[in-house]
Image (cartoon, helix red, strand yellow):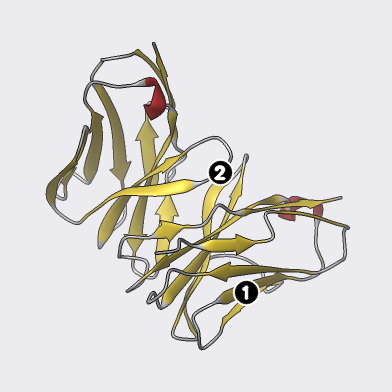
C-alpha cells in the first residue's frame, strides 16, 4: 500500500509569489490535514479536509487555503508569500479525521527568499 | 503557558537504558498522539490514545485523563531510537502540538 506522497519535496519562491503544494493520501483515506513546522513555532495545524469539505481550521491568515478533490488528493495554496512562510509543510491522511491515527508524508520544504 | 508541555526538551541516553518522555496538557482532549520525527523531517505516528496504555514492541504509551498527563516509555533504548518525539492532542476541532523532546541514544 503506497504511503502519503507530497510534491514537490523542495521549493524556492520569491516574496509576493504564490505556491501550491500537493498531497496524495493513502488509498481509502478521506481525511487530509496540513501542518506547518518552523524552528520558532514548531508544528502548527493548518486545516483538515474530509470528503472535499474543509472541516477544521487552525489560526492562519486567509493567505493559506486548500482544497480536496473527489479522489481525496489535496492541495494547499499560499498566496503573497512572506519570508516567514519558509517552513516544512507536512500533510497527513487518515480514514476518519484528526482524532484517528494519522499517516504523514515526507513534507515539502518551502524557502521564501 | 503552552497548552501542551513536554519534558524534558533534550535527553541523552546510553544504549540499553529505559527512557521516559512526559507530556502534560491543559485543554480538553478527545485523543492524544505520540509522533516520532527523524532528521530530514519525516513523521511517524507511534500511538494514538484516549485512555489507558498501549504497547508496541519496545515502546509503551500511557495516559491519565484525570491528571491530564501522558508518558512515552522506551525500553532497552537503541541508537536508532534517536529522533524528536512529539506529543499532540486533539482538542475539539484542531490539533495542538508540544514542542518536542530531542532524544539521542549513544552506543
Please tell me which residue is depicted at 28% across the width and 53% down the height of the picture: B32
The image shows residue B90, relative to residue A55, as above or below, that is above
Q: Name the image quarter holding the N terminus of chain A.
A: bottom left
Residue B19, position as x, y percentages in the image: 27, 23
Residue A48 showing in the rendered view: yes
Residue B76, position as x, y percentages in the image: 23, 21
Secondary-structure class at tag 1: strand
> Mark 2 highlights which residue?
B41
* Among the 4 quarters of the image, the one containing residue A61: bottom right
- Pick the residue in front: B59 or B65: B59
Left or right, A68 with respect to B16, comes to right
Give the Cα separation between the discs numbered 2 and 1: 19 Å
> How many marks overall?
2
The image shows residue B64, relative to residue A29, as above or below, that is above
- Pick the residue in front: A113 or A102: A102
Please tell me which residue is depicted at 54% across the width and 70% down the height of the picture: A24
Question: Would you say the residues marked 2 and 1 are in contact, meaning their CB atoms lie under 8 Å apart?
Answer: no
Please tell me which residue is depicted at 21% across the width and 25% down the height of the picture: B75
Q: Chain of mark 2?
A: B
Left or right, A60 with respect to B61, comes to right
* Label number found at residue B68: none
The image shows residue A27, relative to residue B81, as above or below, that is below
> Mark 1 highlights which residue?
A75
Amino acid at each position: 500500500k503506497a504511503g502519503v506522497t507530497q510534491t514537490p519535496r523542495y521549493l524556492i519562491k520569491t516574496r509576493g509569489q504564490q505556491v501550491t503544494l500537493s498531497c496524495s493520501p493513502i488509498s481509502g483515506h478521506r481525511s487530509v490535514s496540513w501542518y506547518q513546522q518552523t524552528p520558532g513555532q514548531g508544528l502548527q495545524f493548518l486545516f483538515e479536509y474530509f470528503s472535499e469539505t474543509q472541516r477544521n481550521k487552525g489560526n492562519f491568515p486567509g493567505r493559506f487555503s486548500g482544497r480536496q478533490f473527489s479522489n481525496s488528493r489535496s492541495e494547499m495554496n499560499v498566496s503573497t508569500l512572506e519570508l516567514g512562510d519558509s517552513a516544512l509543510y507536512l500533510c497527513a491522511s487518515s480514514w476518519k479525521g484528526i482524532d484517528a491515527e494519522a499517516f504523514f508524508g515526507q513534507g515539502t520544504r518551502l524557502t521564501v527568499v | 503557558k503552552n497548552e501542551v508541555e513536554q519534558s524534558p526538551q533534550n535527553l541523552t541516553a546510553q544504549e540499553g537504558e529505559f527512557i521516559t518522555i512526559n507530556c502534560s496538557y491543559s485543554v480538553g482532549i478527545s485523543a492524544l498522539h505520540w509522533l516520532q520525527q527523524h532528521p530530514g523531517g519525516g513523521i511517524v505516528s507511534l500511538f494514538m490514545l484516549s485512555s489507558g496504555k498501549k504497547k508496541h514492541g519496545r515502546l509503551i504509551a500511557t495516559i491519565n485523563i484525570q491528571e491530564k498527563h501522558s508518558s512515552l516509555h522506551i525500553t532497552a533504548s537503541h541508537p536508532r531510537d534517536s529522533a524528536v518525539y512529539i506529543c499532540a492532542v486533539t482538542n475539539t476541532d484542531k490539533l495542538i502540538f508540544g514542542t518536542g523532546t530531542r532524544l539521542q541514544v549513544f552506543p
